Amino acid sequence: MPIAYHKLLPEEIVDDVTQSNEVKRVQIKGSEFLVYPHVYPSDRFRTTNFILDSIEPLLSEAIVCDMGCGIGVIGLFALGHGARQVVQADINPLAIENAKANRDLYHYSNEKIKIYESDCFDNVPLQVFDIVVFNIPFHSEPHEIEDPLEYAFYDPNFRSTKKFLSQVPKYSHAGTRIFIAFSNKGDLQGLEKIFDDSGCKWELWKIANQDQKYDNRLYVLQIRCT
């Protein structure tokens, strides 16, 4: 019997915040962030705090890639907790401008946080990271992206996830930890098959919100070394 995944309804994306043409401010873990129009506010995702709490002990002196950075929360959190350098990337050009504004808000230099408009690693200069974090969209059903905001929710047929996994080995060393956030709201079996096919070693590292209808999951992957 086919598994029924959650189908995203338009009203779950569009609300008074995301429809607004004004710059908003949100609080995440006691820090303030700007949110531009057509960029989804990270405080709306339960996954954000789950990721931050999980990776905090690993950040000291790490070089971190915040893939699909949105407003830039994970990268800024990483620097605030001891990371040496951060690279942020997002396919949404409005998210890139938003992440730069938040970088400036906290007075980090362009060298400390480098930010690229990029479809996965396409425009990210080659370097190796100690930690790579990608909070991937939960919805992999076919969908025509009409608003850049929708990139935060949809990855039709796991296109971006597959691309990311094909590219990330070049940006990794033997000890790089690659964290991918997901949920049973999406196609778990499909995602885990993609992990198997990628050649990476992987495990389901942590699960949160198991007492709720939809949980939050954090996978950790490492490149296989032969």
Image: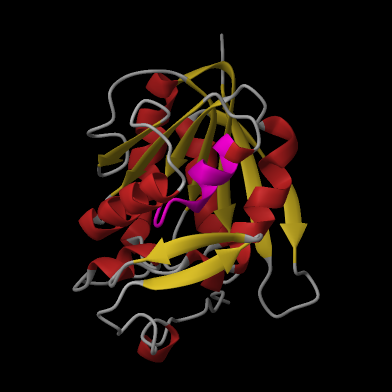
Image quadrant occupied by the N terminus: bottom right
Q: Residue at x 43, y 28 (%)?
A: 112
Query: Quadrant of residue 203 in the image?
Result: top right
The x and y percentages for residue 9 are 41, 87
Most extreme residue toward the top, as rendered?
226
Q: Nearer the viewer, residue 69 or 140?
A: 69
Horizontal side, residue 178 vs residue 81: left or right: left
From which residue to which does the magenta span run?
69-79
Residue 204 visible in the picture: no
Q: Residue at x 39, y 83 (%)?
A: 17
Q: Residue at x 24, y 59 (%)?
A: 94
Query: Quadrant of residue 140 in the image?
Result: bottom left
The x and y percentages for residue 170 are 38, 20
Most extreme residue toward the right, as rendered?
211
Image quadrant occupied by the C terminus: top right
The x and y percentages for residue 182 are 57, 58
Up-down relation of residue 122 to residue 140 (above or below): above
Residue 53 lies in the magenta stretch = no
Up-down relation of residue 80 to residue 148 (above or below): above
